Image (tube, grey):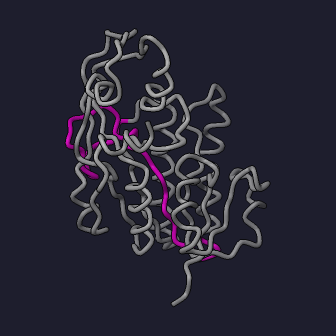
Amino acid sequence: MMVKKILITGSEGFVGSRLIEKFENKYDLTLFDKKFNRDITNPESFKGLDVDYVIHLAAITRSDNLFEMFDVNVNGTFNVLEFCKNSGANLIFASSSAVYGNIESPITETSNLNPSSYYAITKKLGEELCKFYYDNFSVNNTILRIFNPYGPNQTEGFLIPDILSQLGESEINLGNPYQKRDYIYIDDLVDAIDKSLDLNKFNIINIGTGTSYCVKELVKKITDKKVNFSDLSMVESDIYADISKAKKLLSWVPKVSLEEGIKYIS
């Protein structure tokens, strides 16, 4: 049986580094990141690469430089798709639940898209490029709309690592307490990505748990310390995935509960 040859863009990021840990003894990996002098915005960086699959993780989630964000997230995705078109590689595109915006849950893959941030817009544009390349050039690709991943080595700027980073303080300081979100442990996400490699044609799949927790509930699972919330103005929102399609197409279900996942990283 031939070993799958996989290119991972954004290989040095939170998800990419975990993928490498899980895949390095299973697949033939090509790592694509600026650390290796490979720039997603430069088509020349793809020259000479020979792979069967591309797992496209590279993206900027937050930046004061919106030109850079759009260049990486949109133009970079275009370059990846051009490479897949020319090489015949299948694509797994890491999209985000952010493309849905704040809509009624449970969210299915056919729910309306209502991106409310620049990052979400870039992901929606990336998805549209994926559909265009499938329709016009038969590039097999699967879009994974990922709901709030967390796990070891996630950088601050995301809720769970922000809480954990303050455990040494006398109090925890956070923003809005009312948002309920669907948190998926990194190893469950890696498992979903692995199972997605076997898909063909064009697919859009939610990757979450189907359960949501508000910030207050989340904090209580981590610490008993007093929490100060600086933003009480926002109305409560409840965002969680319908994962029935992932269960059917991937024979996948998340295995790690939020309580277990927090124990692994705290």
Return the residue nearer the eye: 168 or 199: 168
Q: Is residue 139 left or right of residue 107?
A: right
Q: Identify the residue at horizontal 45%, vertical 71% (top origin).
A: 197
Return the residue nearer the eye: 55 or 134: 55
Q: Is residue 106 left or right of residue 87?
A: left
How far across and how far down the image is residue 28, in percent?
Answer: 62, 75
- Asked if 152 appears above or below 169 in the picture, the reply is below
- Asked if 47 appears above or below 177 in the picture, the reply is below
Snapshot quadrant of residue 170:
top left
Snapshot quadrant of residue 262:
top left
Q: Quadrant of the C terminus?
A: top left
Return the residue nearer the eye: 161 or 250: 161
Q: Identify the residue at horizontal 30%, vertical 34% (top origin).
A: 181
- Asked if 187 appears above or below 241 in the picture, the reply is below
What stretch of residues is rendered in magenta?
A: 85-114
Q: Please check the rendered image and state whether residue 25 is part of the magenta-colored stretch, yes or no.
A: no
Q: Identify the residue at horizontal 44%, vertical 67% (top origin).
A: 194
Return the residue nearer the eye: 31 or 145: 31
Q: Please check the rendered image and state whether residue 109 is part of the magenta-colored stretch, yes or no.
A: yes
How far across and how far down the image is residue 151, in percent?
Answer: 45, 44
Q: Is residue 27 left or right of residue 167?
A: right
How far across and how far down the image is residue 44, in percent?
Answer: 78, 61
How far across and how far down the image is residue 128, in percent?
Answer: 46, 53
